[in-house]
Image: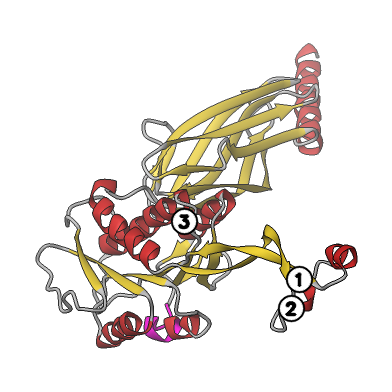
Amino acid sequence: MKIIYIICGAACIYLLQRALYKKYWNKNLFASVYFTQHAITELEEGELCETIVNQKYLPLPMLRVKFEVDRHLDFMQEANITVTDRCYKNDIFSVMMYQKITRRLKFIGNRRGFYAVKEIALDSSDLFMEKHLGMNLICDSWIYVYPRQTDIRRLLIPFQKMMGDILTRRYTYEDPFEFQGIRPYEPFDNMRDVNWKATARIGELRTNLHGYTVRQEVCLLLNLQSESMIEYQQLREESIRIANSLCEMFLKQKIPIGIYSNAKDLLSGKSLNIMPGADLLHLTQIRESLARLDLSQTMEEFHEYAEKILSNKSDNVLYIMISTSQRVEVIQLFERLSKNCCGSYWILPLHSWMEQKLFPAKDGAVLRWEVEQNAAG
């Protein structure tokens, strides 16, 4: 008889715990996966945190946490990671009542990009490991991996030439905020500049005299379209790094720079179009936009895209074109730029064995930029 009672008791306990876990296993259970930094640079170390919080009396003897990230985030020596087309993380925790567990995972950003964790899968079971329990949580965690700086030493001489071109061809305009004094009114003066207080005091029209401010602007055209069916990924990534480095160098000199590219944004699906600016927020915007460039999307023909951009530009702009493609249309575009503006440069990333079709001309400078074929892309 006792055996029957024991069997019945065990059955009741089994069914009770199964019912409890089925109903309450995910109550007050919180899980999050988040990056601890907003952004890192290529080849820098980042950190991803897993946090599990069980705020109830029901323990979870087994809780499996699964999520996936891009394979270009290298988690180095971390266990429970499978890397194929994506990087799959699968961790198992034993979470007691009212316990919080935090696990920090180190990784290296091997390639520029915008990386996100969009979903977390939680799997658990009852005390007897028989009942499968699961749910998915929406996750909104992301990190930017900015393109790294290219070899600054190789850029110094071209950059100094560009700066010299800007300073010798600079354009000045009257700055309404630069007050230098008061002078008699002339018929060609704008009525907005009349100083009415001085006019009332003297009895004759007086106008404000403004100073002049130097206007310097750089337009960077980044062509990431391949010349042929073969896509040289290393050359395109190096082009992005050169663009990033030049933008930072000009902005350190307080020179406004705009950047335009026919490559599409990973999030918006639109071509890169950043108007000239010169503050630190502008540099952050450029870095984030370059990180989000998706080279797998179909690109607009560069010469057609550039023509639309250039139709709104004045003549007092220094143009810098970065393009590994030497198509006839691209060469013709550069030749027009060289003749119709205050200065132009073409930075041409090539492997050592590649032919340079266009050579330095009178009205524009072509700078060959050799990239090692086995370099990290």
Label 1 packing within 10 angstroms: few (<14), some (14-19), many (20+): some
Label 3 packing within 10 angstroms: few (<14), some (14-19), many (20+): many
Q: Quadrant of residue 163?
A: bottom left
- Front residue of 107 and 98: 107
Label 3 or label 1, whichever comes before in sequence order: 1
Quadrant (top left/top right/bottom left/bottom right) for the C terminus: bottom left
Q: Is residue 240 left or right of residue 366?
A: right
Residue occupying image coordinates x 81% and y 31% = 20
- Front residue of 306 and 66: 306
Callout 3: SS:
helix
**Mark 2 is on which residue type?**
Asn
Closer mark to the observer between disc 3 and disc 1: 1
Instruction: Tell me the magenta residue range.
Output: 299-305
* Label 2 close to label 1 by CB (< 8 Å): yes
Q: Is residue 15 left or right of residue 259?
A: right
Residue occupying image coordinates x 64% and y 31% = 51
Q: Is residue 258 left or right of residue 97?
A: left
Q: Which residue is mark 1?
A: 193
Q: Which residue is mark 3?
A: 291
Label 3 or label 2, whichever comes before in sequence order: 2
Q: Is 4 above or below relative to 69? A: above
Q: Which mark is residue 232?
A: none
In the image, residue 172 lies at what x, y percent? 52, 68
